[in-house]
Amino acid sequence: MESGKAMAGLDLEALFRGTYHDLLRFLRARLGARHTAAQDLAQEAFMRMHAADAGSEIRDTRSFLFATAANLVADHARVEGRRRDILREMAGVLDTDHHEITPERAALARSDLAWVRDVLRSMPARQRHILIRYHIGGRTQSEIAAELSIGLTTVRADLKTAIGTLVDARRRVYRREIRASEGARSSK
């Protein structure tokens, strides 16, 4: 792609053929151990390039594509960080190797499970479906997009929103628990 040429009339197929493997290499280097997401992010970068083609004045399409991909990696890292936080939090609830199962722990686990069910039920059906298919079913975002006949951007946005909903709900529960324990201490 010529760098001095504006994007009007972009031949996206030619850009794809000319840059896809370089873009994948770039994404895999940025993602490190999480390189399995590289194909999803490459597809998303091209989809954004296609969306930007409508009347944009982009002088260097290759640079724009790689900058878009770098931004997607940053977004992906934030979502994965939130997902790891949630999984770490849930691991503490589900980890029974180091603790004896007592009636109190069983009641707490039932309570946490009920909490997760309630939060999941409060989500829109598509967000809930995407979250479960991705984190429990092990499906890729591209597979989910194809399965639901929606765009990859929509899958990512719904997944991000669903994870945010879980994190926000958990924070609210922790704040209530802290206030309750402080109230119990102050009444003694």
Image (cartoon, rainbow, N blue to C red):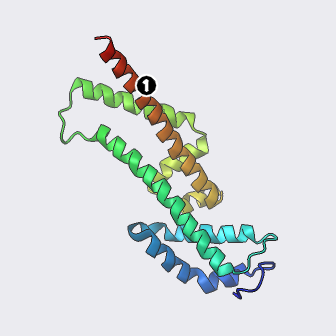
**Is 149 or 1 nearer to us in this picture?**
1
Identify the element where label 1 is drawn. helix
Point out the image quarter for the C terminus: top left
Label 1 neighbourhood size at 10 Å, few (<14), some (14-19), many (20+)?
few
In the image: residue 123, left or right of residue 2:
left
In the rendered image, which residue does mark 1 sit on? 176
Placement of 7 over or under 75, stated as above or below: below
Point out the image quarter for the N terminus: bottom right
Q: Position of residue 138 (x, y in %)?
A: 44, 56
Residue for point 35% across, 41% down:
90
Residue 136 is at least partly visible in this image: no
Residue 155 is at least partly visible in this image: yes
Placement of 91 over or under 139, stated as above or below: above
Placement of 77 over or under 47, stated as above or below: above
Q: Position of residue 53 (x, y in %)?
A: 76, 72
Q: Position of residue 115 (x, y in %)?
A: 44, 31
The mark tally for this picture is 1
In the image: residue 188, left or right of residue 123:
left
Placement of 78 over or under 66, stated as above or below: above
In the image: residue 65, left or right of residue 180:
right
In the image: residue 69, left or right of residue 37:
right
Residue for point 49% across, 55% down:
78
Tell me which amino acid carries mark 1.
Answer: Arg
Q: Position of residue 32 (x, y in %)?
A: 40, 70
| Residue 12 found in image quarter | bottom right
Residue that sits furthest to the bottom in the current view: 2
Residue that sits furthest to the front in the current view: 186
